[in-house]
Amino acid sequence: SHTLLAGVARFGTGPVIAERLEEAGIITTAAHLPEYWGGEGIRFGVQEITRRGATEKDMAPLARWIAQAIVGSRDLDAIAQETASFAAGLGPVRFTWGD
């Protein structure tokens, strides 16, 4: 299902972190995790980025932007400009019935 869950309790609540990431151009949703994983989490649905052609080499900058937004080490608008540029460089959605 191309879903990634991340525990964020040490940085804030799931909804607050999801909102911060959205301001940085990264769309996620808050998720309730089991208490043994910290309870607070976010959910990444990565199927779109995969279907637009992102590969393993693209994951390092994505991880860096996510970390920077979560911990607040960079301006969210600056991250949003970089993520928008990255997304603009991806291809159209592939792997559909019309392919």
Image: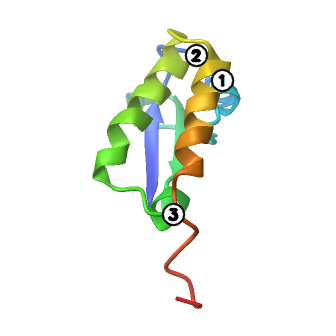
* Disc sitting over residue 12 in the figure: 2
Q: Residue tagged by mark 3?
A: 52
Query: At 58% across and 24% down in the image, what residue appears?
Result: 79
Look at the numbered disc 2 and give the secondary structure of its residue: loop
Residue 80, position as x, y percentages in the image: 63, 29
Q: State the CA–CA distance, disc 2 to disc 1.
A: 10 Å
| Location of residue 97 with respect to 16 vertically, above or below | below
Quarter of the image for residue 16 reads top right
Q: Nearer the viewer, mark 1 or mark 3?
A: 3
User: Residue 34 at what x, y percent from top left?
Assistant: 46, 37
Give the number of the mark in front: 2 or 1.
Answer: 1
Describe the colour scheme in one phrase. Answer: rainbow
Marks 1/3: CA distance? 24 Å
Residue lying at the far bottom of the rendered structure: 98
Q: Which residue is tagged 1?
A: 20
Element at label 1: helix
